[in-house]
Image (cartoon, rainbow, N blue to C red):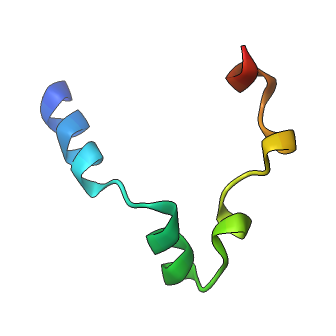
Amino acid sequence: NMIRATMDGLKKEQSPRSVAQRRGKKVSDILPKRDEAPAEAEA
């Protein structure tokens, strides 16, 4: 079940461009700025 759920989630993953278009926003509004990224991402 866990593997099936993971695969379903990966299949439904969308690009930032399509999410921004659906929300009527710019991609830069959807994605965090590099300076605002959490500290864990840099480690």
Question: On the picture, is 26 further left or further right than 6?
Answer: right
Closer to the camera, 5 or 28?
Answer: 28
**Residue 43: quadrant of the picture:** top right
Rendered location of residue 23, percent (x, y): 56, 80
Question: On the picture, is 8 further left or further right than 18?
Answer: left
Residue at image position (44%, 72%) is 18
Question: On the picture, is 26 further left or further right than 14?
Answer: right
**Count of all numbered marks drawn on residues in the image:** 0
Rendered location of residue 33, percent (x, y): 79, 51
Residue at image position (34%, 54%) is 13
Residue at image position (51%, 62%) is 16
Q: Tell me: residue 37, above or below residue 19.
A: above
Q: Tell me: residue 26, above or below residue 8.
A: below
- Seen as rendered, the residue at the extreme top is 43
Residue at image position (74%, 21%) is 42
Rendered location of residue 25, percent (x, y): 65, 80
Q: Tell me: residue 20, above or below residue 16.
A: below
Q: Tell me: residue 9, above or below residue 3.
A: below
